[in-house]
Amino acid sequence: MSCFTIPRMDGRCSLFILLLSGGLSTLPPHSREYHFVNQLMTWTEAQSYCREHFTDFVTIYNSNINQLLFSMSPRINAFAWKGLYDDPYSWKSSMEGKLFYVGSTHEFLIWANGQPNNENTNEYCVALQGQTQMNDRPCGSSYPFLCYNAKNTSYILVMENYTWSAAQSYCRTYHTDLTSIRSKEEKSNITLTLNGSGVQYVWIGLYRDPWAFWSDNTTSTFTNWWSSQPDNFNSIEYCGAFNLMSAEWADGFCGLRLSFFLFQSSDKANSAENEASVRGRHAQHRDPAAGFTAAVRPHAVRRTDRLQDSLEESPELP
Ligand SMILES: *[C@@H]1O[C@H](CO)[C@@H](O)[C@H](O)[C@H]1NC(C)=O
Ligand SMILES: *[C@@H]1O[C@H](CO)[C@@H](O)[C@H](O)[C@H]1NC(C)=O
Ligand SMILES: *[C@@H]1O[C@H](CO)[C@@H](O)[C@H](O)[C@H]1NC(C)=O
Ligand SMILES: *[C@@H]1O[C@H](CO)[C@@H](O)[C@H](O)[C@H]1NC(C)=O
Ligand SMILES: *[C@@H]1O[C@H](CO)[C@@H](O)[C@H](O)[C@H]1NC(C)=O
Ligand SMILES: [Ca+2]
Ligand SMILES: [Ca+2]
């Protein structure tokens, strides 16, 4: 592996890295040129900039890349955007196991007021609340649950308090799975099944993977979260930032204006290969800005003196 930095007159600094081809993994790609852009933009603005002028936001596949980005950026007490984001609408169904986007409005899927909000960064499973509306809830909470039985197409309300995973196991053992809500008809049958049960929350078969997406559609399991991050402070932090003093990660409000890291694919052959290795994912790639705009509570923004939330008050760069 060889690296060299290229100082530039235009305020950008870039680092070119050549990785040995072949090997065990198709990712990261063979060669990428990384840039630090010292201009302050919201996450979405920065994404457009990256795609327009280069290839995309950076994806950090391992600690070497994390360290590279660190070495090429200024040591200032601020954060920079990277390609990572969390999508609070990226729900998967237990029955099909595939991504099933649930937007903020749908004729038969209705979120309770202010939901999904991923409160305290641990709400990755969905319960029906008040029997008709959805709410993301901590998967470890214990609630009654709704199984679906495909043999006799029936919905079974189990009045035992189970965690989401235990409920899923139960439904898979004795019926087919935790129920989905795939149509208006299915929804009305579920409503009928719950009618009169008096339950406050009931698990259904929707769950999601946190922080699963990078802007360039590739996947990576590497993380370098700062302690107590991500914290989804005020339930509005759905974009991934990089601390320029420590190379550690935090979640931040996507509307913040920060500097950012991007990459340029070195040649067309590589980018074609990258595309081929990209996991087939969601049909519509949601603009996360839309997601978190919907999730913002008007009263939610307040100042904080908590150290871990210094991203909230990250000073504007000169
Ligand atoms: C469907 O089958 C399940 C499992 O055998 C049973 O518990 C349930 O009562 C049945 N429902 C109907 C409507 O037959
Ligand atoms: C489930 O938990 C709720 C709330 O704690 C409680 O009121 C209810 O009795 C529990 N149900 C069962 C079957 O244990
Ligand atoms: C649900 O209810 C509709 C009528 O609203 C009915 O046609 C359908 O067969 C029911 N069963 C299922 C599994 O959706
Ligand atoms: C719920 O059940 C009650 C009777 O227990 C009935 O009057 C009411 O219409 C039902 N509601 C729905 C939505 O089916
Ligand atoms: C990511 O995937 C979506 C849907 O497959 C596509 O619309 C979008 O252009 C892709 N983005 C990139 C940078 O490849
Ligand atoms: Ca919630
Ligand atoms: Ca945070």
Image: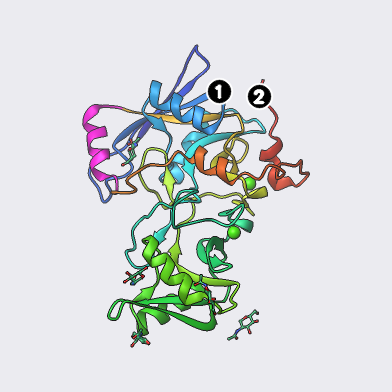
Residue on which the image places disc 1: 38
Q: Residue 195's x, y, as percent?
A: 52, 75
- Mark closer to the chain start, 1 or 2: 1
Task: Tell me which corner region of the image, top left, top right, bottom left or bottom right, holds residue 6.
Answer: top left
Question: Could you tell me which residue is drawn at 26 percent across and 45 percent down?
Answer: 277
Residue on which the image places disc 2: 317
Residue 62 placement, left or right of 248: left
Q: Residue 232's x, y, as percent?
A: 62, 50
> Can residue 250 be seen at all in this image of the molecule?
no
> Ligand 6 sits in which quadrant?
bottom right
* Secondary element at image label 2: loop
Q: Which residues are magenta?
A: 266-279
Q: Residue 160's x, y, as percent?
A: 53, 84
Q: What kind of colouring is applied to the model shown?
A: rainbow
Q: Is residue 290 above or below residue 23?
A: above
Mark 1–mark 2 contact, CB under 8 Å?
yes
Question: Could you tell me which residue is drawn at 50 percent across and 20 percent down?
Answer: 12
Q: CA separation, marks 1 and 2?
A: 8 Å
Q: Is residue 183 above or below residue 48?
A: below
Q: Is residue 215 above or below residue 115?
A: above
Q: Residue furthest right?
A: 305
Badge 2 density bin: few <14, some 14–19, many ≥20, Cα 10 Å = some
